[in-house]
Amino acid sequence: MTTAPTIERVTSGIGTSPVRPDGVLKLRGRFAYASDMHIDGMLWGATLRSPFAHAKIIRLDIGPALAMAGVHAVLTQEDVPGKLNFGQAVQDQPVLADGETQFWGEPIAIVAADDLKTAQRAVAAIDIEYEELEPLVDSELADTLDSVTCRPRIRRGDPDASGEIVVEGYYEVGQQDQAPLGNEAGVAIPDGEGGVDLHATTQWVHEDHAQIYPCLGLAPEQVRCHPVGMGGAFGAREDMSMHIHLCMLALATGRPVKMMFDRAEGFVGHVHRHPAKMWFRHEANRDGKLVKVEAKIILDGGPYRATSDVVTWNAAYFSVGPYVCDNVFVDAVAARTNNPPAGAMRGFGCVQSAFAFETQMDRLAAELQLDPLQLRRLNALEAGQPNSTTGQIIVGSLPTTRVLDELASMPLPPEATSDDPRHFPGGTGLTTTGADIKRGVGYGVTIKNLAFSEGFDDYADVRVVLNDTGVEVHTAAIEVGQGLVTVLQQIARSVLGIEQVNVVSNDTSRIGSAGSTSASRQTQMTGGGAYHAATALREEILERLGGDDLTNEGVWSEGSLVATLPEVVAAGPWEHEIRFRHPETFPPDENGQGDMHAGFAVAAHRAVVDVDQELGLVRVVQIDTVQDVGRVLNPDAAVGQIEGGTMQGVGLAVLEELVLDRGRIVNSNFTDYLLPTFLDAPHIEVRFVEEPDHWGPFGAKGIGEPPTISATPAVVGAIRDATGRALTRVPVLPQDIALG
Amino acid sequence: MEFSRPASTEEAAAIKAADPGATILAGGTDLMVEVNFGHASPDHVIGLRRVDDLADYQDTRIGAGVTWARLEECSHRALAQAARTVGSPQIRAAGTIGGNIGTASPAGDGLPWLAAAEAEIEVYSTTRGTRLVSWDQFFTGVKQNALADDEVITAAVLPENVPSVQEFAKIGQRSAMVISTVSACVMRDDEGSIRVALGAVAPTPIRVRQAEALVSGQSNPSEALLEEFARTVSAEVKPITDHRSTEAYRRHASGVLARRLLERCLAQ
């Protein structure tokens, strides 16, 4: 009988915050991001993009571009070697536009040339004529016209149920961009045998691979997708951008080809968060208990499906929040329009719904003259109860009430946090000396599903190896900056008792899929895989060498060292590979009911804001947040995720929106797409509630998404508290506050 | 692309006269944005960084090459306040007041102060020598000015009696590093005359003369007069709606901001 691994045996195991293996390199500017890649003899690619949201291509002549010195290839839809369309669940997006363009910036032709300038000049030299068509840019009209990709529908309980209090509202969420600092970039390298190696920004190399090789008309083994250094993703890289184009150009020229989007092209080249229009009706009794929630949710997916259907289902599944309600009726729509393509972004549908349902909860609390947190506590959904929308009994932990109580116990900031005018609303603009400021407090609470849902075969392949370099954890999971490589090291250290752990990032030919770095899932999925593979490897080692414990020193038996670590290694090879799956999930029935989700987490935010109402300027002073994390594996990384997620929610609340004009983005730059600066960042206090979950490693839950979801309604609620304005649309703009 | 690096104002003007289509580069904080967005692809750039005398700062003559970082420390209180609102520290270390004048953006952060101070823009050409153009003659439209093709901007020249009571404020949607939605500068001279200049609410920086007349000489205006002042400012500005804000908000905020700055000046 072997002893359980004792996690205290290693110094940098779980529960600690060791130095990240990529941390020093990144701080010193020496980390190789995708945009840094260079190969001698490589060509540069550039893309001709539609200047209209909707247009017919009347004439397309690549001749003038092809005739230019230094231009090696100009390719159009006619040159796509295999399948003409790509996409995740459904392949409905043309690799290059086929006669008609469906969104502003849609790729029409691609060029490879000796250098970037030549490639850009060649793009400009392509002779093309368009006939502009009327773009469909109103998602509500798209719903009316039945231009939709799916209509999720939830029917639970009694449609005739009614409450004593009714609160009804219409809400909008503008289009947020993931705005990762690292732009899209990649290099494709022909292998000389008709195949290609692709190194490009991504969140999931195996999904890219599955979509790329059919479009290239190649066998799966002829295409290899490699992880690259990522400067963020937040969902933007779950759908492909330049990937197939790079491979086409590399195969057509026989040379390595690099593409690198600048900031403006990045805003056009990746998918964004779905803008939303939402009607919500809440009915409750005078005691504060929810009786019925009805909602209509329209998400604008742009012209292609991408992940729209799943995002829209998610918006429906989490349209009530972590609250008990027996009667729920939701109609959601993924509208198909000529607006910029929407896809995955941190929060994945829940962000939109949470802004609406949390505003509704605030309004209900006001009607009932209840403290907003008290109303939420009265309705708190806990483990063992059915989720209000789907009827799924919540398995695992869901400490909603504990999270709310912990938040309530956190101290409020002092009345005047600063006498530095830069910390007043308006900041360095010196718009106020302080006399015009009113303070407000608001709350946001959310529930989020963890990992993939709805019967998707969600797995992560992990191989753990012990050799003379120490332990290796092999995975194709993508580190996007969130700290996965660190937490995988920590898990392997704690299980195996061995300090030296390297994470080996594999391409698609060397290991199976790790699934996407999204859905808050990698700590649980690839981390779970690492946990189970390392545990199995430890068992094998102890069994073969007759020991009962493994440490940095080697194998022990009844307190005596029976084999030193070098002796253990020499007795190898030691390798264990597993395919880790979370508990099975199922697709919804016709009423949107069933066990669709593998697990859940709750997060709650309290925002304190100072508002200069006359000018409509807001300073978010402090955010206190409590998150249900299962178990904290790396406290610093967890705080980092929660602070970063919170800031993305703050950005959506008061700053971030892609401004559209007939489907064209008019602010595709960091001058006008405003992200919060450090001066806009509030002080953030983070607390964890640790109630181990049923399947994550050591009971851990994913933590990436929830903070983004509940931060936004908390900030807007606080602005409402200060101003009395209704504020039914985010981002809240100065004119919304000043002029009402 | 040709790149010239003159060592003196005369040399710079001579190069410009020889190639009137050449583009002047000072800090590059406006020009490089245009280049990066593909809106400008100059054939000939004249870099001014080596022209030392352009970077000379005096209280009554601010060289065109003086950076925002330097102006943050200058003795003109409201100009220093305006300088602090320009971009990031890196931008302020590179960008110059001459660039702000040359670009002539309605949102130029230094321009309301120049308007309130009644600055003259000093320009130089090899054929005509030095010429002074008053600020309201110099700024002629959105990103348009009275600079001739053979001229370079050499300085902002100020009257001896720029009021020392002066306040600047700027509205942007975030706390720093943001393009102005509305900016304003108010000055009060020793006789109690009030000057009110605003930016980003008209094609050029503007003075609101009717509003100024209402409150000039009033050391303790009534609440009613202050409200009328704000309303008059709102009526006098000529803002537009664009992706950064709306006409209605800019009008409203112009009045609020001008009133607040007036009250700050009166309290001094």
Image: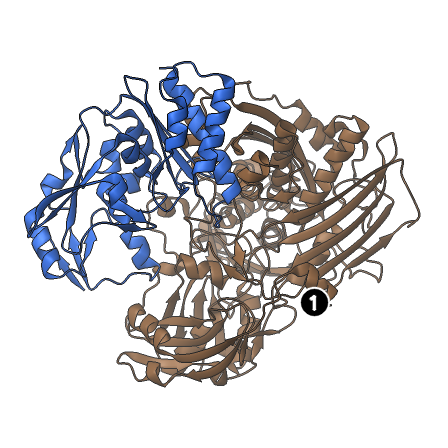
Q: Is residue A570 above or below residue A687?
A: below
Q: Quadrant of the N terminus of chain B?
A: bottom left
Q: Chain of mark 1?
A: A
Residue A67 seen: yes
Q: Give the amino acid at mark 1.
A: Thr
Left/right placement of residue B133 relative to residue A246 reads left
Give the residue drawn at x 48%, y 43%: A553
Residue A60, percent from left and from top: 44, 83
Q: Is residue A549 above or below residue A574?
A: above
Residue A608, percent from left and from top: 58, 28
Residue B202 placement: quadrant: top left
Q: Quadrant of the C terminus of chain B?
A: top left
Q: Label 1 neighbourhood size at 10 Å, few (<14), some (14-19), many (20+)?
A: some
Residue A487, percent from left and from top: 53, 46
Label 1 element class: strand
Q: Is residue A736 above or below residue A423?
A: below
Name the foreground residue: A178 vs A148.
A148
**Chain that appears brown:** A
Left/right placement of residue B144 relative to residue B155 reads right
**Chain that appears blue:** B
Residue corresponding to mark 1 = A149
